[in-house]
Image (cartoon, helix red, strand yellow):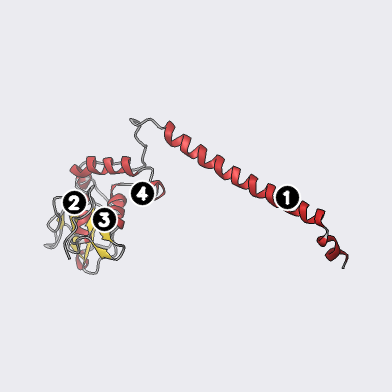
Amino acid sequence: MVFRRLLRKRWVLGVVFALSLIYFLSSTLKQEERTIRDRTLLEARDSDHHIQWKIKFILGNSSRQISQCRNSIQGKSLLTDELGYVCERKDLLVNGCCNVNAPSSSQHVCTSCLANGCCSIYEFCVSCCLQPDKQPLLERFLNRAAEGFQNLFNAVEDHFELCLAKCRTSSQSVQHENTYRNPQAKYCYGESPPELLPI
């Protein structure tokens, strides 16, 4: 009862309001300081300075001996291993690599890919992206996308993981968030989005 009477007094309500206002203003100013600091860091970055990525491109990495391979895993019938080989699921070895002697295995397959780097088959996109001559294209992409996709691409550790991430369908592959720009070539490693096909 005493508490109710105390809350009805105007000076108590004024103190509560003043403390709330101070809390609100201090929180807002701290957020503004963080925003200004982040902006300053971005502006201070020299335009010629390239971001140091963890990705190490090894030209001709297909010739190295490898005991274990990572692969694209998700394909129903096809897989791509980290050496750029595409094979049927039945031709996958125990170590995760494609059996290079199997008739279905081919390295750096780009048969379903267009000139802009968009492919109709995910595994072919990853395999084509793993070609050593795609390194300059991927480095340009990484340097441009660094600020916008920093969290995503900081998690990428090598060429294979970059190609896996880049070839997945993205917002660039769709129009109006529900229709593919080109349903026949929706997996892209290139710089430009798929061409918009008329409906």
Between discs 1 and 2, the one toward the N terminus: 1
Query: Quick one: label 4 or label 3, which is nearer the N terminus?
Result: 4
Residue at the right extreme of this rendering: 2
Circle 1: residue type? Leu
Q: Quadrant of residue 44?
A: top left
Label 3 belongs to which residue? 167
Q: CA distance from mark 4 to mark 2?
A: 20 Å
Which residue is painted at 34% across and 34% down in the image?
Answer: 50
- The answer to whether residue 100 shows anywhere in this view is yes
Mark 1 to mark 2 CA distance (whole Å): 58 Å
- Residue 169 x %, y %: 28, 59
Q: In which quadrant of the rendered image does the N terminus lie?
A: bottom right
Which mark, residue 117? 2
Q: For mark 1, what is the residue?
A: 19
Specify which label sits upstream in the sequence, 4 or 2. Answer: 2
Look at label 3 and name its amino acid.
Answer: Cys
Question: Which secondary structure lies at badge 2?
Answer: loop
